[in-house]
Image: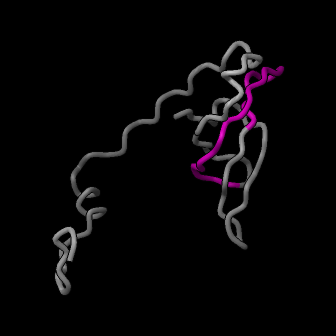
């Protein structure tokens, strides 16, 4: 079989070996400051981000950051992100505080 896999072999999986390596996951970087202006055309593109613990969906979810705004409570990003729902994956669009976003 490809990749050196042999049927009937009972070795540890790659995930198990990585978990036993003693190296932990890297610390997530602090979110970068939001841009001063979103009016430039080159900023109209979405950017991949991670959404940390949004309301009603604890965990870290993949998202697309499409816009920034500054309000009385600070910066927020307009994001779309996918979460696991009881009937399958659900796509959410929301304004999320910058502190909950990690850009990639």
> Which residue does the image show at 72% across and 73% down from the upper left?
87
> Which residue does the image show at 61% across and 19% down from the upper left?
33
> Which residue does the image show at 73% across and 55% down from the upper left?
91
The number of numbered badges drawn on the structure is 0
Q: Residue furthest right?
A: 72
Q: Is residue 3 left or right of residue 39?
A: left
Residue 104 shown in magenta: no
Q: Residue 52 appears at what percent x and percent y?
A: 60, 43
In the image, residue 6 above or below residue 80? below
> Which residue does the image show at 64% across and 53% down from the upper left?
58
Q: Residue furthest top?
A: 36
- The span picked out in magenta is 57-78
Q: Quadrant of the N terminus?
A: bottom left
Q: Residue 41 appears at what percent x and percent y?
A: 72, 21
Q: Nearer the viewer, residue 57 or 1?
A: 1
Picture colour scheme: one colour
In the image, residue 46 above or below residue 34? below
Residue 62 shown in magenta: yes
Main secondary structure found in the magenta portion: strand
User: Quadrant location of residue 67?
Assistant: top right
User: Quadrant location of residue 94?
Assistant: top right
Q: Residue 20 appears at what percent x and percent y?
A: 23, 57
Q: Is residue 57 left or right of residue 25?
A: right
Q: Residue 59 appears at what percent x and percent y?
A: 59, 52
In the image, residue 40 above or below residue 89? above
């Amino acid at each position: 079989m490809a990749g050196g896999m042999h049927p009937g072999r009972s070795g540890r999986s790659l995930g198990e070996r990585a978990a036993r390596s003693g190296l932990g996951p890297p610390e997530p970087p602090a979110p970068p400051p939001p841009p001063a202006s979103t009016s430039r055309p080159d900023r109209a593109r979405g950017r991949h981000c991670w959404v940390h613990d949004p309301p009603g969906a604890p965990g870290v979810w993949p998202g697309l950051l499409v816009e920034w705004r500054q309000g009385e409570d600070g910066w927020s990003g307009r994001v779309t992100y996918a979460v696991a729902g009881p009937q399958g994956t659900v796509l959410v669009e929301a304004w999320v505080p910058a502190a909950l976003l990690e850009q990639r």
